[in-house]
Amino acid sequence: MISQTAEYALRAVVVLGSQPGRAMTTQDVARVSRVPGDYLSKVLQALGRAGLVEARRGLRGGYVLSRALDELTVYDVVHAVDPLRRIHSCPLQLSAHTGRYARFISGSMMPSRWWRVTSSRRPSRRY
């Protein structure tokens, strides 16, 4: 299960990805994604700090994705706004759970890319 913040971030990324290269204001993204504007502003700032979106200033300013939608993963977006806590050692303190197993649990052996965020895998709800 993902947090409400992560869901809002995923919605925003899908909306921004549906208009590649076109800057969208926070209000535009909020209206299309049905996310509260004040909260979305904080979400977009976190996505910006993670390098997933860029803020453009000026008359036609707003937010754009930093890279193509099909280059982003669900993990990238979720981790940007709601970092996943990693297990760094066996909670049971079993010595057999060191080495390779411990690296797997900590995430260092996770697949290099989680699911791709693509327009073909949009949520079933209309925004």
Image (tube, rainbow, N blue to C red):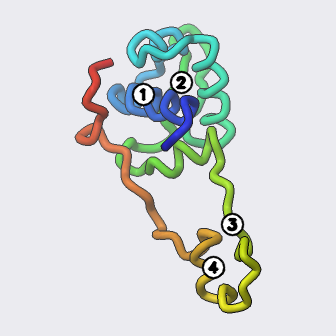
Residue labelled with disc 2: 63
Q: Specify the amino acid type for callout 4.
A: Arg
Give the residue at x 23% y 40%.
120
Rounded to the nearest angstrom, the CA distance separating label 3 from label 1 is 33 Å
Q: Amino acid at mark 3?
A: Ile
Tell me, for residue 16, which label it has, or none. Answer: 1
Q: Earlier in the sequence, mark 3 or mark 4?
A: 3
Q: Could you give the CA–CA distance between mark 4 and mark 2, rounded to whole angstroms? A: 37 Å
- Amino acid tagged 1: Leu
Query: Mark 4 falls on what kind of element?
Result: helix
| Residue on which the image places disc 3 | 87
Q: Nearer the viewer, residue 40 or 69?
A: 40
Across and down, in percent, residue 119 comes to: 28, 37
Q: Secondary structure at mark 1?
A: helix
The spot of residue 47 in percent (x, y) is: 60, 36
Q: Residues within 10 Å of mark 1 (few under 14, many from 20)?
A: many
